[in-house]
Image (cartoon, helix red, strand yellow):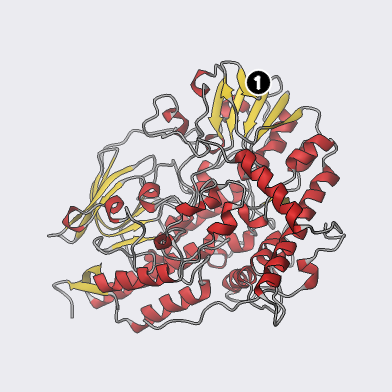
Amino acid sequence: MTEPSQEPSGGLGAVDRVFPSAEQGGTGEEFDPAAIRAKYLEERNKRLVAGRADIRELDQDVHFAAFRKDPFTPFEDREPVVDEVDVVIVGGGIAGVLAGANLRNAGIKRIRIIDQAGGIGGTWYWNQYPGVMCDVESYIYMPMLEELDYIPSQRYAVGEEIRSHLNAVAERFDLKDDALFHTSVLATEWVEDRSRWSVRTDRDDVITCQWYVVATGILNLMKLPTIRGMESFAGRSFHTARWEYEYTGGSSSEPLDRLSDKTVALVGTGASGIQCLKPLAESAKHVYVFQRTPSAVGVRGNRPTDPGFAERLVPNWQQDRMDNFQAVILGRPVEADLVDDGWTHNYAVVRNPPRPKGTAPADFARLAEEVDFRIMEAHRQRVAAIVSDPTAAEILKPQYRYLCKRPCFHDEYLPAFNSPNVTLVDCPAGIERITPGGLVVNGETFDVDCIIYGTGFEAEMTPLPRRVHHVIVGRDKLDLATKWSGGASTLFGMLIRGFPNMFVMPAPGQQAVITVNYTQLAVLGAAFIGRMVSLLTQRGAEAFEVTEKGEESWTRQIVESFIDASDFMSACTPSRLNFEGHPEEANPRNGNYGGGVGNWFGYRELLDRWLEAESFEGLELKMGSKAT
């Protein structure tokens, strides 16, 4: 396979981005590397405690299994489905809908989406909590805007608009009528003599298909922490991904009108907790916010879409805008930063600090550290400028390097702590225990009526066999979990030897690439699947199998380009990005094409050339009886 050009080194080179001005939130604080490292290490050590990463296994947990019940769509009984289709897609979120749309464009007629949810949306179906929104610009995050001739109403869309748009895409490509919702796949097995997959579900469905697409997404496993005594709580408790409006009243966009006499505990200050605090503060009698690690909360700067925005667009505008954003994030030169937000101002610069010609490695490392410090100091000063209580402000200041934890962007979260009915509870080592009446931190009990767990989903790097949440058995009775017990093994991060006619949508931890804008990666993966199935169908192929050489070659490229970031990440505050403080657990086999977050543009070029060649290098084809 021909190797594409690698990502260029270097950064944007804009001085005002590297050292923000006072107007942009920059500071003139002196950079003292030894002092800041000591401070970061002190804060890290407070949080690096035994049991930190322990979570509830909700499949087996008798008490908390009910937390996964769908509160949004009534469950309807139906007869088991016994059917043979062309394609089964597991997952009805962005990945599954895009895969279905591309397969429909490829001429595939019988497509069944299967999803545990009660409808289309994936993460955006489950996350219907008040205030839910996306932190990536809607013009690049919401897929197929050109195809549907739709312009988002605002720069950063709320969850309801994203979910509505995904439903519109599914309807446009006729993906909903044959979908099986409130249905979980239990096991999928390759039937060799028929060259088909057999799919069994928890509703006794048995569906066979020629092509099997795993599109379970990257944030699909609800995460619930293990806290001593949490089963004993006598009040109401639920997860933000299963918000109980029957208890709180209201909706994702309306006041929570049943909380006026309730004291609420909000556990977690990642994206979910940050977004739902304002609606809770406006509605509840009192809100206690339990914070283990503060997020870096940058300016969101949302606004309605300019009425003239659509008039300025040209064909292929959305992909061009996605590519522009991706180029900035990776440090590639661009004529203009089209998105121009916190991701491109901060994240991109920290990832790609400019390196003046002739700079020695040690000097460049110090420059990179100072760039990071200036940006994080600007975040800390933003907290100090907004939060009136100095004690709370200090607790809310993020004390770590920018890439240690996924950044957040919000304009109402920090001001909420100025409300007299909001109390911040600092618990870096976690909540001590939960009693029938409340939560205990450092020996102090906080009595509450309700506990809301804003603890998100299992990390993007969760191994694929766990994320798919069912058993997949390929050739010779080999199951995917066994195949990947020592790490990922694929061709292109989407095709797996021993699992014929199976496609896995690209994602972190499986030998593809990583993007801030997940939709762009899903667009690429779905297009690849659609084009590949179309070519195989035209060729008359009944089945494909990855060759041993093809898989070994790809995996070797991934391992050889792996960049060991454990030295950097071991100094970070524990987070999902460093395996909760144990970056040594990173497996080189689970890396990305090109190393680091991956060579996005090179990866796309390689896939395009492979499809255009139509030689199917790295595959063995089984031709059908009608093949020419």
Point out the image quarter for the C terminus.
bottom left
Q: Nearer the viewer, residue 521 or 202?
A: 521
The amino acid type of the residue labelled 1 equals Gly
The vertical placement of 279 against 327, above or below, is above
Q: Quadrant of residue 109?
A: bottom left
Q: Is residue 113 left or right of residue 366?
A: left
How many numbered circles does the render carry?
Answer: 1
Answer few, some or many: residues within 10 Å of disc 1's Cα (few below 14, many 20 plus, some between 14 and 19). Answer: few
Q: Is residue 399 visible?
A: no
**Residue located at (55% from left, 47% from top):** 581
Q: Nearer the viewer, residue 601 or 574?
A: 574
- The x and y percentages for residue 295 are 67, 46
**Residue located at (53% from left, 59% from top):** 518
Q: Nearer the viewer, residue 257 or 299?
A: 299
- The x and y percentages for residue 254 are 67, 36
Q: Is residue 514 visible?
A: yes
The vertical placement of 457 against 592, above or below, is above
Residue to which mark 1 is pinned: 443
- The x and y percentages for residue 471 are 28, 47
Point out the image quarter for the N terminus.
bottom left
The vertical placement of 202 against 35, above or below, is above
Secondary structure found at label 1:
loop
Q: Quadrant of residue 449?
A: top right
- The x and y percentages for residue 576 are 54, 48
The vertical placement of 398 against 58, above or below, is below
